[in-house]
Image (cartoon, rainbow, N blue to C red):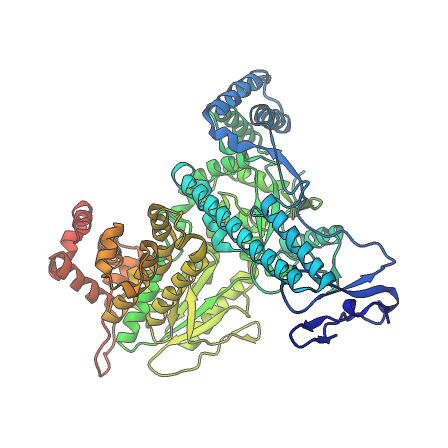
Amino acid sequence: MFKHKGAHQYTWYQDTLGRRSMIDLVVVSSDLRPHVLDTRVKRGAELSTDHHLVVSWIRLQRRMPDRLGRPKRIVRVCWERLADPSVGGVFNSHLWESFNQIPREVGDIESEWTMFSSSIVDAAIWSCGHKVSGAGRGGNPRTQWWTLEVRDAVKLKKESYRAWLARGTPEAAEAYRQAKRTTVVVVSEAKTRVWEEFCEAMEKDYWTASGKFWQTVRRLRRGKQLSANTVYSGGGELLASTEDIVGRWKEYFEDLLNPTDTPSVEEPETEDSEVDSFITQAEVTELTHLCNIAGRSGTVPLDWATGVVIPLFKKGDQRVCSNYRGITLLSLPGKVYSRVLERRVRPLVEPRIQEEQCSFRSSHGTLDQLYTFHRVLEGSWEFAQPVHMCFVDLEKAFDRVPRGILWEVLWEYRVPGPLLRAVRSLYNRSRSLVCIASCKSDLFPVHVGLRQGCPLSPVLFIVFMDRISMCSQGLEVARFGDYRFSSLIFADDVALLAPSSLDLQHALGHFAAECEAAGMRVSTSKSEAMVLNRKKVACTLQVGGEVLPQVEQFKYLGVLFTSEGRMDREIDRWISAAAAVMRSMYRSVVVKKELSRKAKLSIYQSIYVPTLTYGHELWVMTERVRSQIQAAKMSFLRRVAGCSLRDRVRSSVTGEELGVEPLLLHIERGQLRWLGHLFRMPPGRLPGEVFRACPTGKRPWGRPRTRWRDYVSRLAWERLGVPPEELEEVSGEREVWASLIRLLP
């Protein structure tokens, strides 16, 4: 087909037997076949294999589309120089001069904001200058081990290979082999040198710039992130050009943030830099003046109402937009104003929110919900009382909140008119744009949903969800002793509980109806049912004519609950997760001799231990679990200490050498600390009520499981010397209880 000499046709060779073969091919479609200009073998030493590279030249008649990617050259303000006191002093003095030139008479909010922001940016440019990042001439600077020495060694290897092909003598072959060995050594030494410099820089950052150190650790854990340069359109067509891709992302988020199936909403009334992180007294004064104008006028600058949406990949096909989660970046001065409003709204609505809602509230957290759920399952299993559960998932809950209904809910929760007008001002002209690979889309308005990243949004959302929960409550409630409740809510994670399948169906129907009336929608594909019962029973639940799947286990707030009420699988799961954390940083951090033990142990305490012990306050520690936890702990610490099991060094000796607190002691302290919280909880707090409640029923035959309260009471008796009958009195004194836990041997 294409005439070439034999050396440029054979793709595989075996010199010892003189074999040659053409087994590597380039396959093209029939429509591209007329455009193929040439195909041949390119012999070279780069691949280090017995196969040669096959190359085809194809001439395309149409213009190649521009590909989406990060720009090779980015110019920005070098704001990190503000950490230098001398640079910060220049910045402050220049900023004072700029602010003193601003007229003191009150103008409209836009002109005031323009003068404020331009003064900060000008002062930052004057004091910090610009920074250019990205690849420049001479190649990609990210390949740091590619030095002149490496380049010369690789060049010599290529020349030796070509000389061997041309001459075919034993001397030429030996010269090539020697050049190849030399290249391997040079490249290996260069990579080792770069790793040593990298670890030394990490060690220096650990002591001088902790933020940069942890940013590097996060990047190492995350690994290399591959980005897709194409995306599917709404009709399934693959888009490749930058303009089409950015337009598709704009279309996707515009539809997502403006759903058409929500109740009628009100029509709306008529780039910050990271420099704002280094705020000064001058900025505080001017920003206070700006916020006062916004509060009195009931309007905010347009930049405060503008969000930049960044798509973050979750899982699945990277070319499908729905497999991404959009996060919104907002103006930092606007977030300061939102925080001021949040601190005024929260005291008004907090007393009216139900106890079942535990998210974004002071003295409430995930552990409250996890313990309540665990205690209900534990007590119900002990007395053979069935519990029917439905874990409800809401579709895009944060982005579907109708703002018109939200303002009505805030009015019902006694938010006064002036404050409500200030809250609405953040949404009156809200708009967004999408930024993907440093390419920005056009602006589009957003009429529905709450602002992501806004300090005010969490309290608005829990108020909205609290009203749905209150309106959906009926007679179908779960009883635990004398306490009654129908649901557990953490933001939009809703768990409905009922004594029977029929009662649960009624409760689910009421909740789904209230969600529909409020503009929310239950996701039937992600909502699931589960039954705690000593016998296998079916629980058929329907929403909108669709049957929800029934499962044997469900992960609620990060903890795996099963239909048998056991925690064994949960503990095994976190041990595996901790092992995955160690594997992700094994070669880059854990075994690197250039990093000090102090830096490695900080990673152990900050990442490894929290992963391994998540939810440990609920565990009942058996000898098997203790052995597993101890083994998982020493798996990390032995590598930090530079020893192995073959060295036969006791775990206690390794722990004392590293100065690490025993992990089992850490777990026991957490469990006893939580026990004290439960005893001190005031009446009405849900975890305290179920802790003190006595479930009714008759225990079945057989040995009962060890209850969490019995285990932790025995732990307090054995480790602290406090008998069970005195626990409530001793733990009621917070300082006394805390001192006992600190002195735990």
**Residue 32: x and y, percent?**
84, 67
Q: In the figure, is residue 161 to the left or right of 190?
A: right
Q: Residue at x 64, y 74 (%)?
A: 16
Q: Residue at x 80, y 54 (%)?
A: 64
Q: Is residue 447 above or below residue 123?
A: below
Q: In the figure, is residue 428 to the left or right of 628?
A: right
Viewer-nearest residue: 586 or 150: 150
Badge count: 0
Q: Residue at x 19, y 45 (%)?
A: 735
Q: In the figure, is residue 311 to the left or right of 93?
A: right
**Residue 353: x and y, percent?**
40, 51
Viewer-nearest residue: 718 or 60: 60
Viewer-nearest residue: 464 or 162: 162
Can the viewer see residue 400?
A: no
Q: Quadrant of the C terminus?
A: bottom left
Q: Quadrant of the N terminus?
A: bottom right
**Residue 519: x and y, percent?**
58, 58
Q: Is residue 191 above or below residue 60?
A: above
Can the viewer see residue 159?
A: yes
Viewer-nearest residue: 346 or 188: 188
